Image (cartoon, helix red, strand yellow):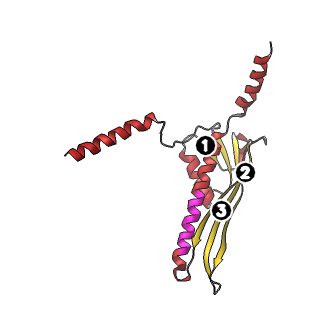
Amino acid sequence: MQRRLFCTAATAAVALALPGCGFKLRQTGDFAFKTLYANFPVNAPLGVELRRNLLGTGKIELLSDPTPMSKADVILDILSEVRQPVVVGLNASGQVREMQLRLRVNFRLRTPSGDELIEPVEMYQQRDLSFTETAALSKEIEQAMLFRDMQVDIVQQIMRRLAAVKPRSANAAAPAAASAAARP
């Protein structure tokens, strides 16, 4: 009975201390735009993941038809996506023993008028994978899972960068207000 009381008290103490230390669950960011044109294949694995995350925010209207592209606040271009399994280790008989999985994604964010809000940037992830011929099928499944994991990480990084974009009007108004305030 005393142990249960102690555990309950310890749990309550931790629950009360977490908000005090600044801890909070990760939330969707506030975006400086309301509509986004998806200039990427929405049927590709990366496109599906991006679409799911963008729509999951509940704050962004996602446009994928080229006709209303000029009505979008911003355009997200996925410039390239490269998945590479690279052999990095062989045994004495020349069989593959270790591979490195690499995923590179280049993207940019721009306005319909062509102003770049996020200049072209490359996201890169890599994972190591041991390999055995006797378990080739399971290693193929593991490879697919690792690529999916890297893809999720990259999409989360893209989402954080999109949330960090500040509206151009606020950025342009701040220097003008600062220079006006500096005048005597």
The answer to which quarter of the image holds residue 170 is top right
**For marks 1 and 2 on the same chain, the one whose residue lies earlier in the sequence:** 1
Name which residue lies at 29% across and 40% down.
Answer: 9
Q: Is residue 50 visible?
A: no
Q: Name the residue under label 2.
A: 121
Task: Indicate whether residue 95 is drawn in magenta.
Answer: no
Q: Are marks 3 and 1 in contact (CB under 8 Å)?
A: no
The answer to which quarter of the image holds residue 103 is bottom right
Spatial distance from mark 3 to mark 1, Cα to Cα? 28 Å
Question: x, y percentage for residue 168?
Answer: 72, 34
Extent of the magenta region: 139-151
Q: Mark 3 points at which residue?
A: 103
| Image mark count | 3
Q: Name the residue under label 1.
A: 61
Question: x, y percentage for residue 61?
Answer: 60, 43
Spatial distance from mark 2 to mark 3, Cα to Cα? 14 Å
Q: Can residue 160 be seen in this view?
A: yes
Spatial distance from mark 1 to mark 2, Cα to Cα? 23 Å
Mark 2, secondary structure of its residue: strand
Residue 131 sits above or below residue 5 on the image: below
**For marks 3 and 1 on the same chain, the one whose residue lies earlier in the sequence:** 1
Tell me the crowding category of disc 3: few under 14, some 14 to 19, or many 20 or more residues within 10 angstroms, Cα based. Answer: some
